[in-house]
Amino acid sequence: MEFSAKQIAEFIQGEIIGDENATVHTFAKIEAGMPGAISFLSNPKYTPYIYETQSSIVLVNKDFTPEHEIKATLIKVDNAYESLAKLLNLYETSKPKKQGIDSLAFVAPSAKIGENVYIGAFAYIGENTVIGDNTQIYPHTFVGDGVKIGDNCLLYSNVNIYHDCRIGNECILHSGAVIGADGFGFAPTPNGYDKIPQIGIVILEDKVDIGANTCVDRATMGATIVHSGAKIDNLVQIAHNDEIGSHTVMAAQVGIAGSTKIGEWCMFGGQVGIAGHIKIGDKVGLGAQSGVPGDIKSGSQLIGTPPMDPKQYFKASIVRKSLPDMQKELRDLRKEIEELKQLLNK
């Protein structure tokens, strides 16, 4: 498919600087541009590439002012990155979608399958399961008994959804995701640990993305809930009875212990660890590798273990580098003080 600068500008409400008839059929990074490609510039770090890129069209922010001649046609928009996302979504939705149930898939007789659904080879759809319209289930995915999946969902290969869990509309689950495995519940006894049955479920609301090899455990009782619009990266652990607020995002290897409530619009960097039975407010930002032992109020922007203000954290990091020298100085000072005491006592 090919689009002109004029068509693109109309779709994203941009201003054309250059040839409105320039056409593109693919996307490319600005530093690896090629004729027929559209690129974008939003990070000033990449500005030098705009003067040498071979891309036919480049999206830029409205405040961008070139310092040299640019060969590419520019489309000025309020936010180049957001406009690129709109175009990528348009490109993705224009691709033809697979439909039909492969002859090698197993679908239980009691399952209810919506319209225009795709179920790939060796996928398993359990008893009394409901699959919504336009949902795609790729090969080797397991959907257990009593599961309900909404419309326009995408489940890649090797996703596992345990019994009775609920998946909303427009959710994306990447390969290896496990929804509804038992929460980590054991009662210590003199002879070891007795398993506590986990009889709850998992609820993913609409437009939730779950990354590859991420686990969302079922509740002991009730539900583990990931609210609408949350985006969870690869290799994340969400434990039993957690509640994740709407539009919260988590980078890879975040781990959340059980019965913790996370607010809306939070942002967690990679490898953040959060203790159980605590509450984190709305719009909380946590830097990578932060360790959270207790509650955090809304609007906090923190980093470290325990989390602290980023300025204090980085100041402390600088001091930490000097600790060996400071320790030596302290020992020397103590030695001098002892020597002075001995002189004064003579």
Image: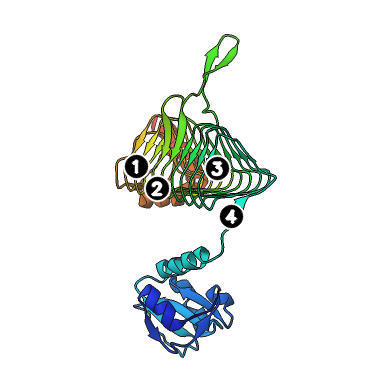
**What is the distance, in whole Å, between disc 2 and disc 1 at their CAs?**
7 Å
Q: Secondary structure at mark 2?
A: loop
Q: Amino acid at mark 1?
A: Gly
Of labels 3 and 2, earlier in sequence is 3
Of labels 4 and 1, earlier in sequence is 4
Q: Amino acid at mark 3?
A: Thr
Query: Residue at the top extreme?
Result: 190
Q: Residue at x 36, y 75 (%)?
A: 77
Q: Name the residue beneath numbered marker 3.
A: 214
Q: Name the residue beneath numbered marker 2.
A: 248
Q: Quadrant of residue 345?
A: top left
Is disc 3 surrounded by few (<14), some (14 to 19) or many (20+) residues within 10 Å? Answer: many
Q: Name the residue beneath numbered marker 4.
A: 99
**What is the distance, in whole Å, between disc 3 and disc 4 at their CAs?**
27 Å
Colour approach in the figure:
rainbow
Q: Name the residue beneath numbered marker 1.
A: 263
Q: Secondary structure at mark 3?
A: loop
